[in-house]
Image (cartoon, coloured by chain):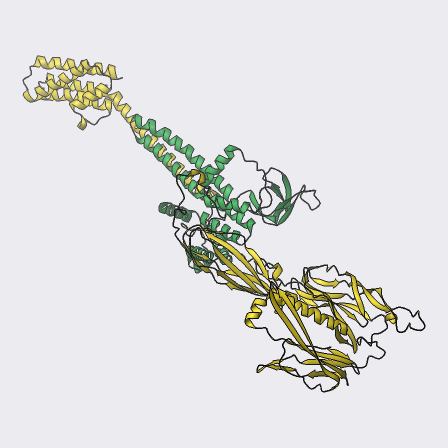
Chain colours: A yellow, B green
Amino acid sequence: MQHYSTYIAIRRLLRGVLLFAAFIPYALASGQEISFTVNYPRVVAVGETFQVVYTVNRSGGDFSAPSFDNFYRISGPHISYSQSTRIVDGRRSSEISYSYTYRLQAMEEGKYTIAAATFERNDKVYRSEELSIEVVPDQEGRTDIRGEEGRRDATGARDGDIFIRVEPQKSRVWVGEPFVVEVNIYSRIDISGISEIQYPSFTGFMREDLETPALRSLERVNIDGTIYGRGTLQRFMLYPQMSGEIEIEPVRLTVQVRERAPVSDPFFGDIFRSFSSVPRAVKGEGVTITVLPLPGGSPDRFRGSVGDFTIEARADRDTLSVNEAVTLRVRLSGRGNLRMAEAPDIAFPETIEAYDPQVNIDRAEAATGLTRGVKSFEYLLIPRQSGDFQIPAINYHFFEPESGTYRTVTQAPINIHVRRGTGDEERPSHSDFTRAEDMRYLGRDIRYIRTSTGSLSVQRDLLVSKRGFYSLYGVAALAFIIVVVVRREKIKRDSDRVRLINRKAGGVARSRLKSAFNALQNDETDRFYEEILKALWGYIGDKFNIPVSELTGEKINSVLVSANVEVDLTDRLRRVVDRCEMARYASVEPVAEAKSLYSETAEIIRDLEKRLN
Amino acid sequence: MKYRAIITTVITLILSDAAVSSSVHERGGPAELFATGVENYRNEDYREALVNWMELYDAGYDNHDLLYNIGNAWFQMDNIAMAILFYERALLRRPFSDEARENLEIAGSHIRVRFTEVPPPFFRRWTDTSALILSSDNWALISLALFLLALTSAMVALFLKKRGWRMVLFPAALFMIAASSITLLLSRHNRNLVYNSRYAVVTETLVTGRSSPSETGRELFILHEGIKVKREETLGEWTEIILPDGNRGWVPRDSMESL
C-alpha cells in the first residue's frame, strides 16, 4: 500500500505541475496558494503500525505536529523534500513539497480524533484537517491488509474476502427523482487488477454515468470489525422511469488476485518467492429500490420535473429597436432531474419572433454525485413591430420529493419596449405584391357567448298544439258565415221589394196619367201638370230604385244613359218635363197643347216600359 | 315585437293557464339570471355559468342566445356532446345563426368519427329551413292574421257595389286563405322540428349499435359521443337510429339526448 501512496503522491505531483503550468502567468503574478494536506488511514487494527504524512508545498515555515495521544509514536517526523521544475513556453516553474511522516501504532480499540497540525509562515497559520481514526480489534484470524510487510498469502483466499455492493444513495425514491448509485468493491486481499466488469442493465431507470476517479487505492473501512479496503468502481445517476419494487441486478467482474507461486526451490524458495496474478470471478449483491409513483392531481403543465427548483428569467436588454435581437435567458436552477427538465411554456407575443431555445446544462458538481445544477434556456427574440410588449409570467411546475407535493415557481412578466425602427422595415411595402403574405390565423376557438339577449319568456304550450287556437279559426269563419248569410237575406228581401215596385211602376204611371186626364177634363190645369210630372218621376224612381227626393234632371239623364236608353227618348222625356215645369209656373199653355203633352207622356212611358223591361 | 308580445300574451291568456317558474323569479327574474351567467362566464367560472343558464332552460325559458351560451359553457367544460346538442338546439331556434353554426363546426372537429353525410332532398331542406325562419307561434299568429284578413276582405268585397274592387278583393281573399293554411302547416312543421325532433345526439362515450333490439344482436358499429343521429322507432329500452351516412342500428334508448 505504501508504494501505492508514494506512487500516487508522485503522480499527483506531476499532475499538479501540469495543471499548474497552465496557470503559471497567474501563479507568478498572485503568488502560489499554500496547500497543507494530510494523508492517513481511517481504520486501523490494534497493534497495527501506520503512517501519517503531512505535506506542505512551501518551505520556510514552522511545522508543529499535534500530540498523538492514544497512539504510540514509533518514529517521526521524517522530513522529506521534493522539487519538480517545469518549463512551459519558455517559462520556468517549480514546485516543491515538504512531507513530515510519522509512524504510529494503534494501542486500544475506539474512535480517536487527533487535533490538526499547524504550519506557520509569515505570521499566517495554516491548519491541516483533523484526523479521525477508528481502531478496531486485532485482525488475528480475520486476515488483514496491513500493508507491505503484512500482506497476506492469497492462496488461501476465502469467500467473503472480496465482495461487491451496489449502494444506492436512497432506497425509496419517487418516479423521476434522480439518485446516485455507487458500485463499490470491498476486499481484504491484494488485488492487482479488475477486468470484465458487467454493470447491471438498470432496467426501469434512465442511467447516466458519473465521472468516477480511476481506482488507484482502496480506502480502509470497518465492516463489522473487519478492515476492508473499499474502492468505488463506478458511480451512476439513476432516474426512475416506472414505479414499483425494482431490482438492480448484481455486478459481475473478474479480479486479478496476487497469488504466491508454490515453493519450488528448497533453499532460496522462501526468499525468492514469486507472485502471479490469478483471475477470480466475483459476483456482487443486488439491491431493490422502491420507486413510488407520483401522486395524482398534477398541474396541467407538469412535465415530469422532480426536485426543487427556482426559475429566473432575464432579458439582456429591455429597450431595443424593431428587428434587433434580444436574448431571454431562463435559468432553471436547483436540485433534481435537470437533465430531463423541459423548457417552460412561454407564450411570446405574436409580433415577437422567438427561436427555439438553446439549452445548456451546467452541473459543476455532477462529479460529486449531487444533482444540483443549472439548466439554462436561451431564447433569441426578434420583435417585428414597435410597441410595448410583455413576456407573460412563466410558471414552472415540479414535484418536490421531500414534501411529496407539486409546487410551482413563477417568474414575473418581463416588459420589453420596442422602438420604431430607423428605416421602413416595419411598414409593409405596398408596391411589392410578391412579398404580401396570406393572413395568418393564430388559432381557432369557439365564438364568444352572447352577452345580452332579447326578451326571455317561458315557452308555454305552442299555439298550434292547442285546440283553442283552432277554434279561433272556427269562430272567425262562423262569424263570417253569419254575416254573409244575414246580408244575403237582406239583399234578397230588398231586391224582392224593388222588383215589385218595378213591375208596378207602369201601372202606377198609367193611373197617374188617368188622373191627369181627369184633371184636364175638369180644367184643373195645375193638377194636370203635377200629375204628369209625378207620373214621370215616379215611374223612373220606381224603375231605378231611387227615392223621389233625390231625383233631378241630371240624375235621371245619367240613370237613363247607363240603362242604355236612346238619346232620342231621353230628349223627348226632358222636353216633356221642361214643358210641364214651364206650364206649371207660367200657366199659359192652351188646352190643345196640354192634350198633346198628355199623349206624348203616355207614349214616352210606353216606350220606356218597352225599353226597360 | 312589442305588439307581438302583447298579442301572444292576450292569446295565451285566453287559451291557457300558464304557470311561471317561481325559482327564477326569486333570483331576480330571467334577465338577471342570464346576466349572472354571462358574468360567471367572463370570469371563466364556466360551471357556475352553466348552472345559472341551465336553471333558466329547465324553467322553460328558451331562445337562441340562451341555448347558444349553454353550448359554449359545455364546450368550455370539455363536454363536446352536450355542446353539440345545445348548438343544434340553438340552430333550430335561429337557422341562420353564424355563431352557433361556426361553434358547432368547431365542436364537431373534436369528434373522432366523420361521416360522409347523405344530404336530405332539396324540398325537404327548403321546407325545413323556411319552417325554422320564424318560431312556431309566430307562424301560427301569421296564419291566424291572414285568415282573419282574408275573411275581412271577402266581407268588404261583398258589401262593395263596384265590381272592380270585387275582382281584386275576392282573389286576394282566396290567396290569403291559401297562405294562411301554408303558414299553419309551417307552424306545425316548426313544432315538429323543434319540439318533437327526431334527431338526437349521442351522449355516452361509446355506444354499440346492434342489428336487433337486444344485447345479443350482432354488433354493427360503435358510436362516439357527439354524433347526431335520427331516431326511428323505439322498442322497450331500445331505439332504432339512422346514422348520418344512412346506416341503421339499434342502440339503448338512454344513450342519447333528443334535440
Percent x, y of residue A482: 37, 35
Residue furthest to the right in view is A266
A199 sits left or right of B93 in the view: right
> Residue B229: which quarter of the image?
top right
Percent x, y of residue B102: 49, 44
> Residue A343: which quarter of the image?
bottom right
A312 sits left or right of A492 in the view: right
The quadrant in which the C terminus of chain A is found is top left
Look at the picture and state if A229 lies above or below B47.
Answer: below
Percent x, y of residue A80: 70, 78
Look at the picture and state if B39 lies above or below B155.
Answer: below
Percent x, y of residue B127: 48, 35
- Residue nearer the viewer, A343 or A7: A7
The quadrant in which the N terminus of chain A is found is bottom right
| Residue visible at 42% across and 34% down in the picture | B179
Tell me, yes or no, if residue A218 can be seen here. no
A3 sits left or right of A326 in the view: right
- Residue nearer the viewer, A359 or B46: A359
- Residue nearer the viewer, B125 or A66: A66
- Residue nearer the viewer, A60 or A387: A60
Tell me, yes or no, if residue A292 can be seen here. yes
A71 sits left or right of A317 in the view: right
> Residue A405: which quarter of the image?
bottom right
